[in-house]
Structure formats: structure tokens, C-alpha cells
Image (tube, coloured by chain):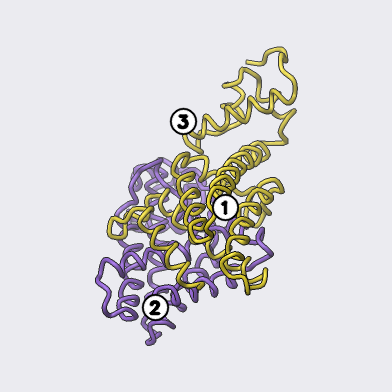
Chain colours: A yellow, B purple
Amino acid sequence: MGRRSDHSRDELRAMALEAAGDIVKEEGIQKLSARAVASRIGYSAGTLYLIFHNLDDLISALNALTVAGLRARIEAVARATADPRERIRAIAHEYLFDSVKEPELFRLAFEHTAGPGSPVPGPIAAETGAIVEIAVNTIGELLPDADRRSCTLLAAVLWSSVHGICHLGLTNKLEIVGRLTAEAVLDRQVEVFLDGIS
Amino acid sequence: MGRRSDHSRDELRAMALEAAGDIVKEEGIQKLSARAVASRIGYSAGTLYLIFHNLDDLISALNALTVAGLRARIEAVARATADPRERIRAIAHEYLFDSVKEPELFRLAFEHTAGPGSPVPGPIAAETGAIVEIAVNTIGELLPDADRRSCTLLAAVLWSSVHGICHLGLTNKLEIVGRLTAEAVLDRQVEVFLDGIS
């Protein structure tokens, strides 16, 4: 399995993360192992452990990429939408759209923890924080008299609401209730939120 | 490992589910295997496979128990709370409280799927549906002019909102945002919901 290293450390890291993402997308979270990643890139698992401390470390790096992609797309959508009410709708829909497009990567990014109570790794926390910050600022435009703390609390309300739809949707639980689609629940939820805060 | 069967099929089933629950609570989801369950109850893994088709089947049975417990506690809280606005607050808090009390069992119940796109097993769907039904009826009391379909959609909005807080909270993501507690976000969320629908 092992081959002479033809690649730099950075190249190996990028190859491993791409292979890990492909395994999760094609075969599901359960099939992700150091061995499976190593086999895809033609190196030994031992080589992988020179780049990542362990499988958790590799998964965290992959999850940081997933959340960075989500952040970039939500940022683009937010920048393209001037009206703050419309912008709330647009970022909520982009979040849902993203979760559905790569369901297994999204689930891994939001379900994985290194163990009960372990903190979210720094890069993932930074990207997630940047997403919520877009909501905080947009809510600030909608409620010019509200202080930053109130806007942050409302952004957390919006984020967890939208995230709940994504998570129940991806685990096929939403359809238990009157065969509702995630889109229908999201549309209603965003309107309830906008009506509730105004 | 194997021992002569001193227990009936029903007793074995109950023992296996209790052992599986203990493993998840004490050691985490990752440590749950047919071997670990069999070892705890002093039977062989082969005996387990006479009762459950496979590990997924055992996990589904365990998850059905978890969601049934949640349903029973939410039902009790709902029955004890006459005012419908108060009842919405009470059931939302009970859901959060339950998720925090046994975080690993709650995560397993809501994160586990037998594979991408596989439907929720019947018993879990029935218990989950019963929980949402309590919300549908309470919203119906709050909005006597709304038809059942609207109340169901609003119940799904409430459920996914509360669930999102639980899931982000249990994976330690809520604290990324201004060190908010799940309780603080839940309180604000329920008020936004009640204001938004009235």
C-alpha cells in the first residue's frame, strides 16, 4: 500500500481531505476511516498520521472545509440581497439548500463531536460564528433600536430554527408530520420569525 | 461467553435494551456494538441475533423507548398546564430538559438513520407524531380560526425550532454565539413564536 512520497505535506493534506469528502458523499459517514482515506490516495495509513493526529483531527479539518463553504455561499447570497427581510429569507434558504445538496457532509459537520462535552474546534467555531454574524447584522438593520446582545440572541433563535429543520429533514423526521416538506416548514418559520420580532 | 438460556425471549429483549442504553449513557454512542451488549448481559452475540435482525434493529428499538419516554413526559407536562401559551412554553422546556438529561440517548434517537434516505421506523414515527400532535392541538386552542393544516405546519415550525436548539446545544455549537445558553435561546424563541403566530 505505502508508496514513496511524491507529494508535499500540503498536497497530501489536500488529497486526504478530498478523498475523505468523497467517501462521506459516496458511501456515508460510517465508511470514513483512516484506512479508507489512505487507500484512496495510494498511501499508507501511517503516512496520514504524519499529517493528522488521528481520525478526529482529519474529520475536524474536513468539517471546517464544509462549514467554510456554507459560510462563503451564505455571504454571497447576503451580499446580493439589499432588503434585510429578503436577506433573512435568502440566507435561511441557502442554509437549507446547502444541507440538502450534500446531506452526509452537512450531517458530519454538525453531528460530529470528539466526545461528549468536547468544544467545537477553533476553525469550525470561527466559520460558524461568521455565518451567525451575518444574521446578527441583518437583524440589526431590521431593529435599529435593539442592542447588539438582543440581536445576537435573535440570530441564535433564527439559526437554531433553520438548523432544526435541516436536521429533522435530513434524518427524514419532518415527513412524519403531515408529509410536510422542509421548504414549506422553512417558509412558514421565517415568516413567524419576522412577524415575531417586529 | 454464551450461557444456557435462563431467560425468555421477552426478558432477553428487555435486558439487551437496558444494557444498550447503559452503554450509550456511560460510554457514548461509538461504543455500542452487538458484542458489547451481549457481553453486558452474559450471552453470546449470536443469541442477540435471534432477537434482533441486526444492530440497526436493536438501535431502533432503543430509540423507540427513548422517544416514548420523551412523549410520556411531554404529555404529562401538557396535561398539567391548562393555559395554551403556558403549555407551549412548558412542552418546549420539557423537550430541552429531556435532551440535556440523557444527551447521548437523545442524540442517538435523533441522529441515527439506517442509511441515507431510509424512513423512520414505525414505532419511532408514532411516538414522534404523538409529541407533535400535542403541539398541533395546543396551537389549535391558541388559534381557533386556523384550520388543522395551518396548525400542523406551525407545530412543525415549533418542533424544529426547539429541536434545533437541543441539537446545536448538545454538540456544543450554541456557545460559539456570545456564550448563549440553550435555555436563554429557548425562552426567546418561544416568545418570538408566540408573538409571530398571534
Front position in the image: B30 or B153 = B153
Would you place residue A104 above or below residue A138 in this image?
Answer: above
Same chain assignment for discs 2 and 3: no
Kind of residue at badge 3? Glu
From the image, state whether disc 1 or disc 3 is nearer to you.
3
**Distance (Cα) linking label 1 and label 2:** 42 Å
Q: What kind of element bears circle 1?
A: loop
Instruction: Locate residue A159, reporting x and y percent.
Output: 54, 59
Res. A157 image quadrant: bottom right
Front position in the image: B79 or B45 = B79
* Drawn side of residue B152 relative to residue A39, left or right: left
Front position in the image: A139 or B84 = A139
Instruction: Locate residue A7, reporting x and y percent.
Output: 71, 17
- Label 1 neighbourhood size at 10 Å, few (<14), some (14-19), many (20+)? some
Kind of residue at badge 2? Ser
Same chain assignment for discs 1 and 3: no
**Distance (Cα) linking label 1 and label 3:** 26 Å
Q: What kind of element bears circle 2?
A: loop
From the image, state whether disc 2 or disc 3 is nearer to you.
2
Residue at screen point 70% across, 45% down: A123
> Disc 1 sits on a residue from what chain?
B
Q: Residue B28 shows which numbered tag?
A: 1
* Drawn side of residue B147 relative to residue B111, left or right: left
**Distance (Cα) linking label 2 and label 3:** 45 Å
* Drawn side of residue A140 relative to residue A25, left or right: right
Would you place residue A196 above or below residue B24 in this image?
Answer: below
Q: Residue B198 shows which numbered tag?
A: 2
Kind of residue at badge 1? Gly
Residue at screen point 38% across, 82% down: B84
Res. B158 image quadrant: bottom left
